[in-house]
Image: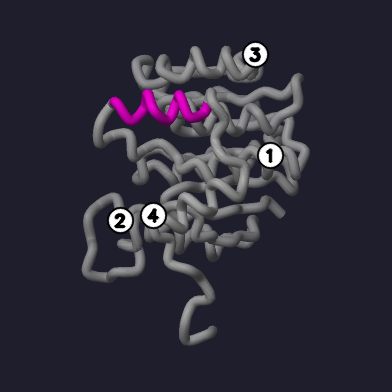
Amino acid sequence: MADSPKSVRVSSSVHQYLVAHGSPPDEIQQALIDETQTLGGISVMQISPEQGAFMTLFARAIGAKHAIEIGTFTGYSALCLARGLPDDGVLICCDVSDSWTAVGKPYWERAGVAHKIDLRIAPATETIAALPESPSFDLAFIDADKRGYQAYFDGLLPRMRPGGVMLVDNVLWGGSVADPDVRDEDTTAIRRFNDQVAADRRVESVMLPIADGLTLLRKR
């Protein structure tokens, strides 16, 4: 391993540059970003614009048709994923908040993707358990309570088709996962999850420094 990482520190100016030179948010996406920011500090739960662009492109690149996300918040990630699916594709969105997900619904309509989104308000473990056990999902996105990550992974993996991919958010947790002195419950849960999936021979994985860390897990 190289002594120094081959990466660039993402300052505000660099972040603006990389968003502008990818696929920046369009008018609908930007409006949803702006409305979410009015919620205050909790708006940090929304994925970053470059991550959204990556997820749209990735869904298209793998030809995903059946997808599921755990943790919808105000619907930006759902909007991005749904745009990457074909017109007859389906994205099941799992969340426990009517109020947060209600923010996104008008934007899904404006973007013309609402017909692809199947929103289910219930604990995600219950929604997953009620799904058919046959391996049918092409793509999954996990971005919910960190202590539930392992349960979501365990429930979803049998339902992923061979070659299907899970995207797992916040796996770097602000860098705390690499600091042994940080031992709060969320950091410990993410650290344990990262260790377990890295050693799980049922998947091949790569952790990318996109936003707060994004792990790609491909079912063998």
The span shown in magenta is: 29-38
Q: Position of residue 24 (x, y in %)?
A: 57, 40
Mark earlier in primary sequence (2, 4): 4
199 vs 203: above or below: below
Mark earlier in primary sequence (2, 1): 1
Q: Position of residue 68 (x, y in %)?
A: 59, 31
Q: Which label was assigned to residue 187?
A: 2
177 or 129: nearer the eye?
Answer: 177
Q: Amino acid at mark 2?
A: Thr
Comparing marks 2 and 1, which lies closer to the viewer?
A: 1
The Cα–Cα distance between marks 4 and 1, rounded to whole angstroms, is 27 Å
Kindly identify which residue carries mark 4.
12
Comparing marks 4 and 1, which lies closer to the viewer?
A: 4
> Where, quadrant-wise, is the C terminus in this rendering?
bottom right
* Relative side of 68 to 104, left or right: right
Kindly identify which residue carries mark 3.
115
178 or 4: nearer the eye?
Answer: 4
Residue at the image position 39 percent from the left and 28 percent from the top: 34
Residue at the image position 48 percent from the left and 33 percent from the top: 70
